Image (tube, rainbow, N blue to C red):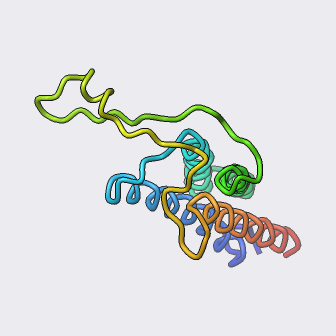
Amino acid sequence: MSTIENPQFRLAQRIALAVPALLLAGAYISQYGFDLYPCEMCWWQRYPHFAAVAFALLSFFAAPKRLWVALAAGGILTSGLIGFFHAGVEYDLWEGVTSCAAIPQATEGQSALDAIMNAPVVRCDEAPWTLLGISLAGFNFLISAGAALFIFTLLRKDAKA
């Protein structure tokens, strides 16, 4: 059975696209819908997800398909590991970056300087939201690491088939 016809590969391919796309969608919904602006380390977690979406999309159109899915899984895992580090900073387990990020958003009739001066300061060592004691960075770690390991398992089964 070819890779394209193998159900394990198709599942891995779909998960490699869906997980980072949904996590990025959640990040942007929390940012623009609930004013949970990203800190510097939050942005670090988004970049590998952007790459994972691109690699997963490539796997639908270009050979070698297994390589693109594996690279997407690697991007997902990378984001999860950054999320692990960020969650550790939020829980005071270790020290992270010392800079804070400000997100200037100019509104109509507002000068750029006013937008910068009134921008919210976002700290990397404070979780702006938690559920059951788990921060957004912690959820990114749990979801991303689990999904990446599952994708790698499916690819391994696909290689044996």
Residue drawn 68% across the image and 61% down it: 141
Residue 127 at x, y percent in the picture: 55, 56
Residue name at image x 64 percent, y 68 percent: 143
Placement of 138 over or under 11, stated as above or below: above
**Figure quadrant of the C terminus:** bottom right
Q: Quadrant of residue 103?
A: top left
Which residue does the image show at 38% across and 59% down from the upper left?
Answer: 29
| In this rendering, position of residue 107 left or right of residue 139 | left
Identified at 32% across, 27% down, the residue is 116
Q: Residue placed farthest to the front in the image? A: 92
Res 59 → quadrant = bottom right
Relative image position of residue 38 (x, y in whole percent) = 48, 46
- The number of numbered badges drawn on the structure is 0
Extreme-left residue of the structure = 109
Quadrant in which the N terminus appears: bottom right
| 149 relative to 73, above or below | below
Closest to the observer, 59 or 20: 20
- Answer with left or right where residue 16 lies relative to residue 154: left
Name the spot of residue 86 as percent of width and height, x first: 66, 50
Point out residue 122 in the picture as x, y percentages from the top left corner: 47, 42
Query: Taking 127 as reference, is 115 above or below it?
Result: above
